[in-house]
Image (cartoon, rainbow, N blue to C red):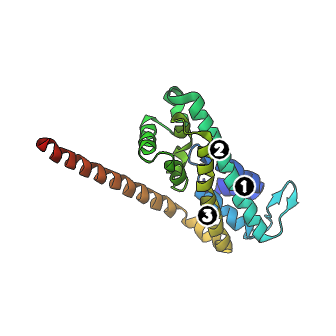
């Protein structure tokens, strides 16, 4: 997957970044890898690959970084809007029939709905900056009928630091990208550890609330 993604970005530059990030807004498409590689490409880490926009080469590394990060941001925002539209137009019936194609089964949808119930619109903003979780916000937001204006603004505000931050990391790595390329598998372990930790945190809090509720019941 790493070779495929980086190959597309190397061949198609800004357009590949836009498209891959748009896809990631609906289901996971390695946005971390996309943006880090885009940042490394912007700094000229790969001979023969210069970012171009409408056929014009972007020779300035600084402007190439801005262009790559902006392409990722705008692509992801476009995907967010498409995902919201899918959710609001298709609703639960669509996911019951086609959810497996979007990697959004009933369990993930129910979890997202609980997050929306608890955190309201803030979940859109925070969710955009959480690995993996960020790809399961768009469609549930449409199903939950989050107002389009607020949803778009919150999605944009949450996406900007994610895209520009990861691209900056790739920009700083520069020619050291190859070591990251080979060691990228460790990012999967880190993400998995974060998810396990998050699930454990939520489970512990739920158990504590349940224990407190049981303690109150006899006295009531």
Q: Look at the image and tell me in which quarter the C terminus lies.
A: top left
- Tag 2 residue: 79
Viewer-nearest residue: 34 or 137: 137
Residue 50, given in percent of the width and then of the height, sits at 80, 64
In the rendered image, the vertical position of residue 209 relative to residue 176, given as above or below: above
Residue 101, given in percent of the width and then of the height, sits at 55, 35
Q: Is residue 13 left or right of residue 104?
A: right
- Tag 3 residue: 166
Q: CA distance from mark 3 to mark 2?
A: 18 Å
Viewer-nearest residue: 42 or 216: 216
Question: Is label 1 in a helix, a strand or a loop?
Answer: helix
Label 1 vs 2, first from the N-terminus: 1
Q: CA distance from mark 3 to mark 1?
A: 13 Å
Residue 22, given in percent of the width and then of the height, sits at 66, 47
Q: Residue at x 61, y 55 (%)?
A: 157
Q: Residue at x 59, y 45 (%)?
A: 150
Q: Is residue 115 left or right of residue 50?
A: left
Question: Is label 2 in a helix, a strand or a loop?
Answer: helix
Location of residue 66 (image quadrant): bottom right
Q: Is residue 11 left or right of residue 187?
A: right
Q: Residue at x 33, y 54 (%)?
A: 200
């Amino acid at each position: 997957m790493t070779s495929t993604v980086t190959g597309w970005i190397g061949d198609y530059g800004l357009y590949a970044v836009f498209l891959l990030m748009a896809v990631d807004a609906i289901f996971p498409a390695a946005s971390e890898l996309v943006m880090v590689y885009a940042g490394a490409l912007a700094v000229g880490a790969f001979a023969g690959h210069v970012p171009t926009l409408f056929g014009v080469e972007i020779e300035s590394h600084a402007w190439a970084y801005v262009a790559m990060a902006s392409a990722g941001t705008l692509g992801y925002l476009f995907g967010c809007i498409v995902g919201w539209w899918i959710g609001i137009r298709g609703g639960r019936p669509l996911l019951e029939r086609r959810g497996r194609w979007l990697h959004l089964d009933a369990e993930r949808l129910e979890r997202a709905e609980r997050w929306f119930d608890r955190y309201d619109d803030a979940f859109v903003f925070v969710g955009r900056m959480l690995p993996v979780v960020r790809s399961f916000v768009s469609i549930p937001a449409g199903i939950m009928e989050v107002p389009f204006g607020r949803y778009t603004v919150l999605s944009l505000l949450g996406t900007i630091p994610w895209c520009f931050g990861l691209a900056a990391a790739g920009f700083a790595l520069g020619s050291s990208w190859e070591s990251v390329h080979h060691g990228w598998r460790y990012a999967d372990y880190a993400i998995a550890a974060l998810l396990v930790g998050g699930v454990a945190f939520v489970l512990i809090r739920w158990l504590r609330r349940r224990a407190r509720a049981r303690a109150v019941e006899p006295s009531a």
